[in-house]
């Protein structure tokens, strides 16, 4: 459903709510209609818990459910979940309020195009990611709308010379910026799209990327006048503001279908945009499994030549990427560090896909004038205990080590200052000790200094793969001593889908076996640790 149709339905919805509310004003119960659709991810323990609670509570309070609760799973295809639910939801709304359906959905452009000629250069947005003048005189606070342009101080390779992959250690200069961070926080980085991909879009659409244009919202009541800073060139929009590398959602394919001149191409796009079983399977195979982005779609469907302004309207905004900060401000008050693997892989169609941010950052090195990157800090609840004497266990394979590097720096500094520091135990895993053992020299020095107890798993150095979870199962006594006998903290950082879930299951076994508890009591014990912030996760799927 397009925006104008949605607004029409929503206005009628509110009007009918008002009428029903007035009609029942003198009764004990207000029969207000409601509907809930939740957004969640099944890899997390409390999947869509808020939506489920709100739906149940509204029913308890006497509100009238218009249609069944909808739950979106971002681990699969959240848009498909929503569209499937929405297609049944709107007929239910029409039936509930006695509204005649509008028939087949018709696409209506949300933005009006204006192309400019001879516009003064100082009136044109030329790049970065925010308003034109905000970078000429930067001021705090720095956030998503006003990131700090941080000079790159260090950019060095962490993998060994025989590794086929790359992992960067990058330090950003924040001296005199008044930026404050804590170990465990996240650093947001605004990337820039690859110029080769941008040029391919211009070629496939037969457009001049240097044309300056403005997209203006046709809804005069909307507070969002433009989809991104305008006026700018198509090149600027595609380089700095639009996401051109992710798998396009089905609503984008539906819009694109109108521009395919070959009937077979048009039907193919319409099928993948549909909610039929065949359509979902086609979308899953051709877009998701074969990992096509908008560039690939334009290349593989030659008859598809959408107007570049409409493409700029329907593509999602390019979002910042978040990285766990891998330093402590107590040791590095004027710089902030990140640890990032350079993403590069071959798709089933034989194309090489590269991570937007890491590919861009790999080319950022100290220089004069300084090479700058737009950043800001996002606060986290991933925190060390307030007292350094409390023991901790950290589980962080691969770049999951990143926040723990900051934790270890902080605990080591406290030890050197003569403070009582509890056990600091790290479980780290990688493929091979000579290739991707991140910060090896630092970690081994912490062990020699007595700051750190280190358990390492090198998965590909023996016949059977060994992961950090195998080491945890071998060290159940150590785990129970920390989390059961000494009320210590455990931290997990890394893959949510497998590693974090396996760690949770191992903890459950440890509490059951060493704590002599039933499965239910052990689960409650771990939930209590979670509520007390003694069990913390910083994970991604």
Image: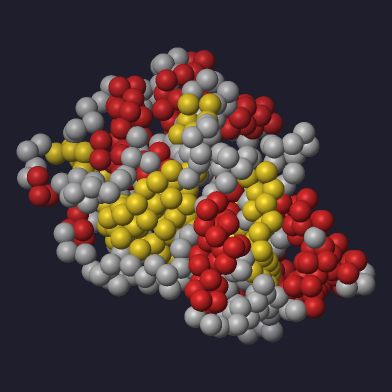
The residue at the point 33 percent across, 28 percent down is 196
Q: Nearer the viewer, residue 518 or 163?
A: 163
Question: Can residue 134 be seen by looking at this rendering?
Answer: yes
Q: Nearer the viewer, residue 415 or 226?
A: 415
Q: How many marks?
A: 0
The location of residue 414, given as percent across then percent down, is 52, 77
The location of residue 72, given as percent across then percent down, is 63, 51
Q: Is residue 394 left or right of residue 127?
A: right
Q: Quadrant of residue 131?
A: bottom left
The residue at the point 14 percent across, 39 percent down is 116
Q: Relative to residue 423, is residue 86 depicted above or below?
A: above
Q: Relative to residue 496, is residue 175 depicted above or below?
A: below
Q: Nearer the viewer, residue 129 or 168?
A: 168
Q: Is residue 120 left or right of residue 534?
A: left
Q: Quadrant of residue 364?
A: top left
Q: How is the image coloured?
A: secondary structure
The location of residue 482, given as percent across then percent down, is 75, 72
Q: Is residue 149 left or right of residue 68?
A: left
The location of residue 462, given as percent across then percent down, is 74, 36
Question: Can residue 539 be seen by looking at this rendering?
Answer: no
Q: Is residue 56 left or right of residue 452?
A: right
The residue at the point 77 percent across, 70 percent down is 526
């Amino acid at each position: 459903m397009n925006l104008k149709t949605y607004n029409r339905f929503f206005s009628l919805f509110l009007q009918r709510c008002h009428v029903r509310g007035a009609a029942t004003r003198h009764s004990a119960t207000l029969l207000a209609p409601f509907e809930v659709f939740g957004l969640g991810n099944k890899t997390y323990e409390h999947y869509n818990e808020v939506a489920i609670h709100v739906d149940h509570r509204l029913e308890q309070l006497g509100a009238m459910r218009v249609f069944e609760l909808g739950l979106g799973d971002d681990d699969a295809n959240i848009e498909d979940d929503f569209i499937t639910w929405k297609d049944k939801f709107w007929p239910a709304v029409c039936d509930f309020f006695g509204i005649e359906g509008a028939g087949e959905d018709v696409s209506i452009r949300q933005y009006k195009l204006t192309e400019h000629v001879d516009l003064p250069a100082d009136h044109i947005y030329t790049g970065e990611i925010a308003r034109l003048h905000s970078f000429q005189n930067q001021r705090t606070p720095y956030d998503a709308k006003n990131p700090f342009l941080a000079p790159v101080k260090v950019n060095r390779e962490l993998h060994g010379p025989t590794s086929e992959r790359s992992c960067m250690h990058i330090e950003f200069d924040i001296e005199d910026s008044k930026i404050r961070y804590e170990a465990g926080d996240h650093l947001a980085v605004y990337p820039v799209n690859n110029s080769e991909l941008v040029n391919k879009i211009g070629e496939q659409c037969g457009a001049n990327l240097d044309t300056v244009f403005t997209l203006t919202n046709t809804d005069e009541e909307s507070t969002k006048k433009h989809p991104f800073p305008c006026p700018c060139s198509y090149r600027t929009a595609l380089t700095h503001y639009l996401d051109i590398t992710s798998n396009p959602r089905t609503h984008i394919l539906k819009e694109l279908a109108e521009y395919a001149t070959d009937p077979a191409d048009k039907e193919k796009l319409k099928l993948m945009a549909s909610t039929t079983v065949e359509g979902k399977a086609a979308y899953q195979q051709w877009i998701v499994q074969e990992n096509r982005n908008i560039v690939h779609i334009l290349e593989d469907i030659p008859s598809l030549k959408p107007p570049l302004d409409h493409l700029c309207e329907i593509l999602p905004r390019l979002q910042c990427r978040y990285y766990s900060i891998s330093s402590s401000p107590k040791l590095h008050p004027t710089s902030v560090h990140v640890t990032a693997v350079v993403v590069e892989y071959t798709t089933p169609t034989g194309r090489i896909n590269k991570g937007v941010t890491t590919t861009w950052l790999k080319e950022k090195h100290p220089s004069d004038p300084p090479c700058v990157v737009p950043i800001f800090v996002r606060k986290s609840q991933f925190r060390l205990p307030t007292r350094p004497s409390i023991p901790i266990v950290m589980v962080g394979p691969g770049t999951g080590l990143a926040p723990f590097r900051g934790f270890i720096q902080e605990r080591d500094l406290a030890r050197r200052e003569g403070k009582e520091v509890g056990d600091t135990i790290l479980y780290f895993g990688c493929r091979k000790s000579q290739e991707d053992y991140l910060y090896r020299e630092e970690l081994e020095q912490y062990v020699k200094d007595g700051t750190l107890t280190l358990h390492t798993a090198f998965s590909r150095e023996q016949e059977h793969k060994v992961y950090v979870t195998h080491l945890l199962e071998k060290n159940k006594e150590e785990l129970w001593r920390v989390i059961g006998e000494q009320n210590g903290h455990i931290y997990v950082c890394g893959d949510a889908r497998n590693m974090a879930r396996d760690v949770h299951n191992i903890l459950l076994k440890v509490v059951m076996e060493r704590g002599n508890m039933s499965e239910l009591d052990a689960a409650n014990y771990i939930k209590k640790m979670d509520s007390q912030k003694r069990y913390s996760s910083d994970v991604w799927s």
